[in-house]
Image (spheres, rainbow, N blue to C red):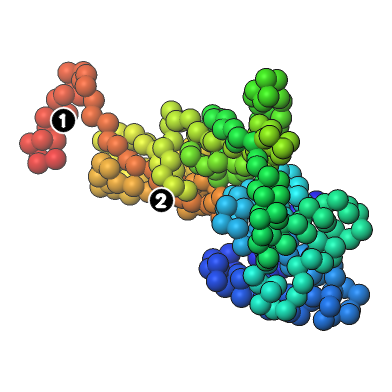
Amino acid sequence: MQAKDYYQILGVSRNATPEEIKKAYRRLVLKYHPDRNKNKDAEEKFKEINEAYAVLGDSQKRKEYDLLGSAFHQQYSTEDIFRDFDIGDIFKDLGFDTGDFFSYIFGGRRKKQRETFGDFFQYRTHPGPFSRRRYQQAQIKGPDLIYELAITLEEAMQGAEKDISYERGGKIEKITVKIPKGVDTGKKLRLGAKGELGPTGIPGDLYIKIRVLEHPLFKRQGDDLHLDRAITFPQATLGSTIDVPTLGGKTLSVKIPPGTQSNTKFRLKGHGMPRLNASGSGDLYARILIQVPTHLKPEQRKLIEELARFGI
């Protein structure tokens, strides 16, 4: 499945509220529903609209979509996307029959699947003892699994693919996990249907919990990076040009003006961490620490004592 911009499909911004997303969806459904729009492209547009709303209208799926970006469709199948998709009330308000919904979405490919989803929407719209029982049985998923994955700060900056092994159903499963650029400690990547099997054969999900290891030189604060750079007293007093390394492997020249004090920070714009699922990067802050010599030769001590007499 190719990467799609669901926000663009619904015509909303990435900061849109759930109400704005729902409003946009209702407007587009009215415009492109095949019962109203006989244009040959309307049905395909209708499918895209519902797929977009199935993701953006679900808070958890939306978080995963925002987190994973183009990797979202590598971890979510069409069935995952439409799982628990409830448009019963919306379609009823608009005067449409939910029974034909997945006929439009899946066409004639999978009659059994259409019947399953048809039962689901029938329960949502016309609840009854039999349909409720069948819906509840069909929705019993297996337990979710959590795998903690440690990555380096460099991998968090550049993105990576990591091969992992985990136990599932008494067997060892091996999969490759795509780590998006800019991910931070505590983020969870969802791999749909990779958890334990439930009593009806529906698997739970696998959540990859990210832990970014500490770096010996750089400290991360959000999208910004911080490092300490030591300079000598003469460099701070007279001014100098120093080299500052970046996590990306570059070395930058930074001009230190005369009279620079210890703990002064220099901002190197755009040399921090890439923003997760967004353009641009944070900044790199180099904090200046003035080194004080601990061992002096006699002639050095004499010079410093001479400077002290001049009030320096």
Query: Seen in the image, is 68 located left or right of residue 218?
Result: right
Frontmost residue, 164 versus 120: 120
As drawn, the residue found furthest toward the front would be 129
Identify which residue, 289 or 158, lies in the foreground.
158
**What residue is disc 1 on?**
304
Q: Position of residue 196 (x, y in %)?
A: 66, 31
Q: Mark 1 falls on what kind of element? A: helix
Q: Residue at x 61, y 75 (%)?
A: 23
Residue 157 seen in the current view: no
Residue furthest to the left: 309
Residue 55 sits above or below residue 243 on the image: below
Q: At which x and y percent is residue 38?
A: 89, 80
Three-letter amino acid code at the position of disc 2: Arg
Q: Position of residue 129 (x, y in %)?
A: 66, 55
Location of residue 83 in the rendering, given as x and y in whole percent from the top left corner: 70, 52
| Residue drawn where x is 37% and y is 49% of the image | 266
Residue located beneath label 2 in the image: 267
Secondary element at tag 2: strand
Q: Relative to residue 185, is residue 297 depicted above or below?
A: above
Tell me the residue at 34%/34% (across/down).
230
Q: Nearer the viewer, mark 1 or mark 2?
A: 2
